[in-house]
């Protein structure tokens, strides 16, 4: 019987990405229920901070020092290490977040090892023949459960499908810094640019306040940002707002943007067309402020406030600020 | 400049009618097929790069059922030079591992400076095939591209990769594989001239035998993953609609957030 591995994606400032803490929580519980080991894998130029963090969730963490990850795209470098680790230990499943780095890693490791990949898991159980992975398809219209025909494989996990909970005891960090010949061509990172106005990453946000065409222009996003700030959330947008150049693509939610599952999705001036809906319909609670009661979002929001988004938004901001003092 | 664009026909997401057939696979007859949205952004980027270079050709590569040429014509009408259609009854039900292997094998027969692929497909949303194709070919993979700047003189390519807070500027030697996003720019509509020209463009069909691949290692029976079960998601329940003054609306939102323990 093999262990279950969680490969940690790079978090901000060398720390642990929240998706990795969530994946670790899910995997620890899955491992405990099936009598398997749970092992975290951190591959970074300085793995110590993220490894220490991951060890609060998992009994064992392998910390791999990889200087090349500093100024090279992470996934190609990390995939070589993961494939290399598998030469010694064969895990029953490898788990990674379903964000950009996790997907890149899953694809590369799959090619190097021949392991299948089940994507965008919303929950994972253990079936007769290995992991039984639930995912949401067709824009949230259907839930499927799939498994690996060979009993083992790679699973990408959607953010916010579980809450990160630390383990009762802190785990052991083992340095595994053996040199590995590069398995895949490395891609240099020349610069990492932070764009003004880019808010908190939306995939991992517990609360998203999102603006659409109804916001009317870049200055109209001020109320979206203020509400996000008051609620401690991130700013999202529909494709209409991104196409108009009011907000960067990194904040776009929907078919060709990001798929999110926050506890609260507050939509301002968003009609909820199918291309947007598929990116947010599995959110915990959906609240919409929109003038148009015929907008599609009126059919799937939990709460729909008919009105001018700036007027309702300003009143809401005042009430939220009054609550927090 | 020689560019290959990977293209996947997908059920039209705007139709909202996608469903699985009795075999647990996508029911392709249920809704019309369209070019995957992110692949259109990749193709548009390729067209702009060729236009800017003043020369070049764009080959579409698609692994898809026999009906795919209908969809590929639309991409040819946008301005691609030709298409290579990998199709074989033995490929039905193939998993992502098989798909990446087949695409990588087909790419070995094509001459290119770089390969563009949509970062994911609207029907599967896995987003792993381009990375796997690059790994099979031993080529650099530059993903989540919002800008692509190839330099054929120095044989390098630079890509702005969308990051949570902005972008990373990546650089790699050519040839390379690029994962493309919508941030590259809105795809053009085919012109009438383009549509006419597409009728005469070449679509080369390749079978597994043509590629020298063993049919028994592809398709449903060889898939690394299998569907076990499906169910409908829990209904969200009815929408509560609030009409009133802005402050009444705001007050209801605050109450709702408190009821749901969000604040």
Image: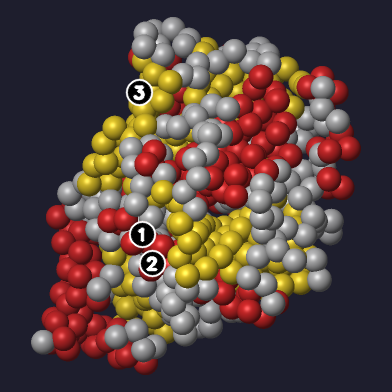
Secondary element type, mark 3:
strand
Where on the picture, by quarter, is residue A293? bottom left
Q: Which residue corresponds to mark 3?
A: B149
How packed mark 1 is, by other alpha carbons closer than 10 Å (few <14, some 14-19, many 20 or more), is: some
**At 79% from the left edge and 55% from the top edge, which residue is drawn?**
A150
- Please name whichever residue, A15 or B173, is drawn nearer the observer in this view of the structure: A15
- Please name whichever residue, A107 or A293, is drawn nearer the observer in this view of the structure: A107
**At 38% from the left edge and 55% from the top edge, which residue is drawn?**
A47
How packed mark 2 is, by other alpha carbons closer than 10 Å (few <14, some 14-19, many 20 or more), is: some
Above or below, comparing residue A125 to residue B15 in the picture: below
Q: How many marks?
A: 3
* Residue A276 rendering spot, x and y as whole percentages: 44, 57
Q: Is residue A61 visible?
A: yes
- Please name whichever residue, A10 or A51, is drawn nearer the observer in this view of the structure: A51
* Residue A26 rendering spot, x and y as whole percentages: 55, 73
Q: Which residue corresponds to mark 2?
A: A52
């Amino acid at each position: 019987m093999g262990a279950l591995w969680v490969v940690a994606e790079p978090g901000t400032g060398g720390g642990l990405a929240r998706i990795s803490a969530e994946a670790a929580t899910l995997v620890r519980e899955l491992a405990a229920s099936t009598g398997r080991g749970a092992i975290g894998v951190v591959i970074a130029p300085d793995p110590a901070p993220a490894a220490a963090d991951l060890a609060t969730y998992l009994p064992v963490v392998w910390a791999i020092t990889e200087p090349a990850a500093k100024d090279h795209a992470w996934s190609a470098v990390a995939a070589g290490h993961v494939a290399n680790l598998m030469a010694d230990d064969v895990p029953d499943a490898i788990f990674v977040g379903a964000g950009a780095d996790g997907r890149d890693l899953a694809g590369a490791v799959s090619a190097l090892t021949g392991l299948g990949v089940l994507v965008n898991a919303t929950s994972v159980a253990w079936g007769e023949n290995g992991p039984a992975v639930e995912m949401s398809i067709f824009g949230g219209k259907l839930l499927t459960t799939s498994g690996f025909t060979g009993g083992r494989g790679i699973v990408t996990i959607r953010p916010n499908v579980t809450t990160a909970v630390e383990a009762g005891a802190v785990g052991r960090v083992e340095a595994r810094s053996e040199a590995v010949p590069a398995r895949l061509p490395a891609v240099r990172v020349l610069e990492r640019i932070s764009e003004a106005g880019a808010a908190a990453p939306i995939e991992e946000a517990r609360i998203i306040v999102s603006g659409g065409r109804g916001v009317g222009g870049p200055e109209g996003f001020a109320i979206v940002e203020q509400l996000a700030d008051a609620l401690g959330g991130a700013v999202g947008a529909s494709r209409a707002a991104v196409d108009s150049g009011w907000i960067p693509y990194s904040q776009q939610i929907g078919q060709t943007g990001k798929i999110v599952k926050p506890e609260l999705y507050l939509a301002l001036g968003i009609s909820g067309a199918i291309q947007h809906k598929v990116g947010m319909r599995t959110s915990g609670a959906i609240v919409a402020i929109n003038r148009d009661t015929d907008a599609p979002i009126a059919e799937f929001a939990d709460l729909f406030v008919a009105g001018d988004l700036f007027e309702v938004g300003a009143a809401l901001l005042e009430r939220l600020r009054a609550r927090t003092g | 400049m020689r560019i290959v664009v990977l293209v996947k026909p997908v059920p039209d997401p705007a139709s909202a009618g996608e469903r699985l057939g009795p075999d647990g696979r996508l029911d392709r007859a249920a809704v019309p097929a369209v070019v995957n949205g992110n692949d259109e952004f990749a193709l548009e980027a390729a067209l702009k790069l060729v236009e800017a270079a003043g020369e070049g050709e764009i080959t579409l590569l698609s692994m898809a059922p026999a009906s795919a040429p209908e969809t590929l014509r639309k991409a040819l009408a946008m301005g691609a030079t030709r298409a290579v259609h990998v199709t074989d009854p033995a490929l039905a039900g193939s998993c992502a591992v098989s798909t990446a292997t087949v695409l990588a094998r087909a790419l070995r027969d094509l001459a290119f400076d770089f390969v563009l692929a949509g970062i994911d497909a609207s029907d599967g949303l896995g987003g792993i095939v381009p990375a796997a194709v690059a790994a099979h070919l031993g080529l650099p993979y530059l993903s989540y591209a919002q800008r692509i700047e190839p330099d054929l003189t120095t044989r390098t390519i630079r890509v702005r990769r969308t990051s949570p807070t902005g972008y990373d500027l990546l650089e790699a030697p050519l040839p390379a594989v690029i994962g493309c996003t919508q941030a590259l720019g809105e795809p053009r509509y085919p012109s009438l001239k383009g549509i006419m020209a597409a009728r005469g463009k070449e679509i080369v069909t390749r079978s597994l035998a043509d590629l020298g691949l063993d049919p028994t290692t592809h398709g449903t029976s060889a898939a690394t993953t299998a569907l076990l079960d499906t169910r409908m998601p829990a209904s969200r329940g009815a929408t509560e609609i609030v009409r009133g003054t802005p402050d009444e609306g705001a007050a209801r939102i605050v109450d709702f957030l408190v009821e749901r323990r969000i604040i």
